[in-house]
């Protein structure tokens, strides 16, 4: 929104991390002191306490961020599907409103490397790689510029991207800018299946490691990978602090909206055989804050927020018209207490399995299409109840209540809410098979098999 005195539009910066759990930050109670900059900004701006991705896989989440559309609407329901070139994006919308637009870091929405101009989602300035995890290492940062030329940047990868962002901010003061800074960290380095922290960070954090309860109970790769992962988180927060200080030194901090969030979380091979792709809090809940014009002093927001709400919120806060096609809603009225928040957040699951989940203030409810390939199809017509967690009594989701007879009424209510959320996202009305019906089918199949064995043995 333009400054009423100067008429100047605010700058907008998105700082996106990759695979960062919500409970890595002090504002969410982490006791290790990793994120003083995030915590300070959350206290002075707007802290989104219950923030969730709408799809816990890199490319689908990023497609939702760029377009404001659910992955099943844009078609980017799994990794490897490029962003459709005809869709309006944050870059084209801000660009049409007179903004300089820039992208730095990981893209993951193209078919080619280097990413050609037509696959960049409308961004004018470009220093990025489609698959940053495959073209660079933690101390070997490689990006490609507007001309597609390879640029090797010095330093730890987090610092190299932050340096590039600060250079961009410094030279783009002739008009309002929209900068999307997309880090790879704290995502694992695929080539080594490890979490390479800055030198010395992993060792220092291993000595004072505090393990979240879900990971302590379930194990996975936690003890091997968590110290390095948290070292990455610490360096990301230091980078955030440097960017804020650069804005302050240039005299534009008060004129700049900053959004910090992540595309999804990480469960360290505890919920399936890799790191995400599940409906559990570890995969879907992320740290989120807004800072700057329209957000300063709003405090903590306890309502439910989906990633799909972030694009229209940025546009609304900058005074740019929000397209009617966007499927999220601007958070500003809810943050100001002018409108009720979400009743639930829809989660679309792909690749590992075809699933849909609803996260309410108290409940987590997921259905699956067990016979379908999550890489081959975006959704299903028939789902079966798979998971139910009471987040009040079981915040770490260690007890699946889906077969609890005492919760049949809760499941009935959540079935209806989930179906409504899917319809709102543009999906066809699903048939959801209850766990009782699924059990009946299993028993009938077992009895049929027993009769067949008996008949053939006589």
Image (cartoon, rainbow, N blue to C red):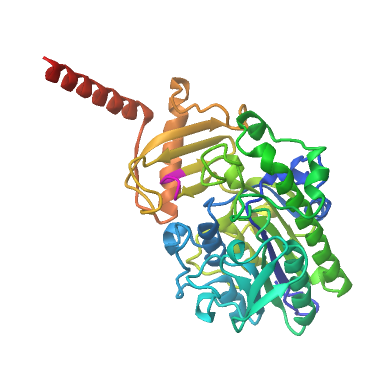
View extreme (left): residue? 458
Q: Tell me which residue sits at (72%, 47%) in the image.
A: 228
**Residue 355 in magenta?**
yes
In the image, taking residue 268 as reference, residue 255 lies left or right, namely right
Q: Is the N terminus in the top left, top right, bottom left or bottom right quadrant?
A: bottom right
Q: Where residue 184 sits: x, y (%)?
A: 65, 60
Depth check: 45 or 202 in front?
202
View extreme (right): residue? 249
Q: Tell me which residue sits at (60%, 70%) in the image.
A: 129
Magenta segment's dominant SS is loop
Picture mark count:
0
Depth check: 324 or 225 in front?
225
In this rendering, the answer to whether 100 lies above or below 417 is below
In this rendering, the answer to whether 51 lies above or below 96 is above
Q: Is residue 338 visible?
A: no
Q: Image quarter for residue 292? A: bottom right
Q: Which residues are magenta?
A: 351-356
Q: Image quarter for residue 411? A: top left
Q: Is residue 212 visible?
A: yes
């Amino acid at each position: 929104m333009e400054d009423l005195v100067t008429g100047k539009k605010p700058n907008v910066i998105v700082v996106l991390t990759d695979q960062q759990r919500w409970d890595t930050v002090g504002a969410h109670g982490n006791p290790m002191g990793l994120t003083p900059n995030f915590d300070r900004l959350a206290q002075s701006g707007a802290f989104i306490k219950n923030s969730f991705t709408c799809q816990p896989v890199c490319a689908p989440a990023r497609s939702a961020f760029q377009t404001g559309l659910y992955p099943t609407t844009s078609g980017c329901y799994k990794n490897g599907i490029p962003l459709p070139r005809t869709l309006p994006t944050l870059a084209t919308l801000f660009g049409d409103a007179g903004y300089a637009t820039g992208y730095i870091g990981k893209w993951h929405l193209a078919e080619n490397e280097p990413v050609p101009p037509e696959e960049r989602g409308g961004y004018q300035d470009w220093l990025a790689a489609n698959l940053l995890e495959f073209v660079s290492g933690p101390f070997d940062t490689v990006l490609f510029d507007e001309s597609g030329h390879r640029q090797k940047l010095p330093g730890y990868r987090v610092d190299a991207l932050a340096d590039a962002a600060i250079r961009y901010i410094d030279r783009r003061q002739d008009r309002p800018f929209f900068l999307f800074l997309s880090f790879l960290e704290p995502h694992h380095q695929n080539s080594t299946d490890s979490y390479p922290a800055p030198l010395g960070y992993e060792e220092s954090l291993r000595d004072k490691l505090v393990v979240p309860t879900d990971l302590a109970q379930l194990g996975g790769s936690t003890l091997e990978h968590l110290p390095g992962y948290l070292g990455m988180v610490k360096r990301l927060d230091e980078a955030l602090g440097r960017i804020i200080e650069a804005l302050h030194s240039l005299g534009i901090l008060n004129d700049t909206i900053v959004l910090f969030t992540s595309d999804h979380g990480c469960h360290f091979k505890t919920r399936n055989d890799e790191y995400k792709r599940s409906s559990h809090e570890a995969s879907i809940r992320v740290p989120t804050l807004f800072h700057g014009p329209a957000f300063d002093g709003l405090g903590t927001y306890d309502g439910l927020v989906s990633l799909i709400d972030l694009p229209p919120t940025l546009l609304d806060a900058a005074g740019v018209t929000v397209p009617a096609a966007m499927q999220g809603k601007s958070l500003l009225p809810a943050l100001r207490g002018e409108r009720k928040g979400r009743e639930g957040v829809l989660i679309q699951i792909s690749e590992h399995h075809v699933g849909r989940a609803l996260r309410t203030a108290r409940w987590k409810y997921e259905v699956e299409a067990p016979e379908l390939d999550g890489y081959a199809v975006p959704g299903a017509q028939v789902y079966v109840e798979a998971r139910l967690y009471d987040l009040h009594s079981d915040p770490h989701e260690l007890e699946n209540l889906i077969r609890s007879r005492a919760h049949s009424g809760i499941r009935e209510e959540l079935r209806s809410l989930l179906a409504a959320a899917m319809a709102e996202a543009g999906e066809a009305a699903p048939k959801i098979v209850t766990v009782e019906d699924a059990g009946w089918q299993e028993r009938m199949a077992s009895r049929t098999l027993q009769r067949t064995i008996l008949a053939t043995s006589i």
